[in-house]
Amino acid sequence: MKPVLIRATDAETLPASGVTLFADVPDTGGHLTSHRSIFKPGKEGAPPHQHKEASELFFVLTGSLRVLTGDDIILLNQGDFLVVPPNTPHAFEAAGDSDTEVLFVLTHAKPRFDYYRLLESVYRGETPPAELAKTSDLYDNHYVESPTWQTR
C-alpha cells in the first residue's frame, strides 16, 4: 500500500450536511475511513447509534461538541480527542454559539462514503429518512434508543 494523500481541493464536499470526505476504506487498504464535518451552533451531528465493528475517533478542530458515550454526556472542546469503541452507543451535536469543526476517523470500518452521500440526499429532502435505517448492516451504523440523550 502507498501513502494516501487527499488534497483539500480534491476532497468531495457535501454542502447540505457539511461533510467533507477524505479517504474511505478502499483508499486505505481496508484500514480506515475519514471525513470532516462542520456543524452550525446547536445542530445535531448524529442521533444515538453504535458501530458493531468500528471504533470512531473524534478530534475537535474548532468549537465545542456535546457527545453521548454510553450513558454519559461529555463536552469536547477545541483540541480534545475521543475514541468511542465498538458497541458503545454515541451521539453528538454542536455546543456553544459558534461553528464546530470535527475530524472523524473510523477504524475497522466498512466503506462509508455512500452512507454520507445518502445522508446528504436525506438533508436535501430527496430521500426519506427511513432509508437510512435500511442500511444499518451495510454501513455498520445501528441506531439505538438513549433516554440519556433524549433528556439532555
Image (cartoon, helix red, strand yellow):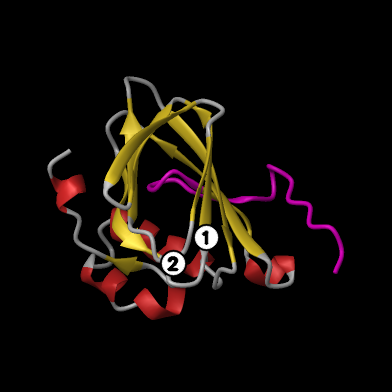
Rendered position, 151 above or below 31:
above
Please say whether residue 121 is visible from this viewpoint: no
Q: Position of residue 101 (x, y in %)?
A: 49, 34
Task: Name the image quarter holding residue 50.
Answer: bottom left
Of 141 and 20, the residue lying toward us: 141
Question: Of residues 116 and 86, which is closer to you in this image?
Answer: 86
Q: Does the magenta stretch include residue 4?
A: yes
Tell me the quarter of the image containing the N terminus: bottom right
**Percent position (x, y) of residue 90?**
34, 53
From which residue to which does the magenta span run? Answer: 1-19
Residue 115: which disc?
2
Q: Main secondary structure of the magenta part?
A: loop
In the displayed structure, would residue 97 be above or below residue 150?
Answer: above
What residue lies at 53% left-to-right and 31% top-to-bottom? 80
Q: Residue at x 52, y 60 (%)?
A: 55
Which residue is the site of mark 1?
Answer: 55
Residue beneath the point at 51% across and 55% down: 56
Query: Could you say whether the residue bearing mark 1 is in a helix, strand or loop?
Result: strand
Which of the two residues, 127 or 143, is positioned nearer the viewer here?
A: 143
The vertical placement of 119 against 63, above or below, is below
Based on the picture, tell me whether residue 29 belongs to the magenta stretch: no
Say which amino acid is labelled 2.
Answer: Tyr
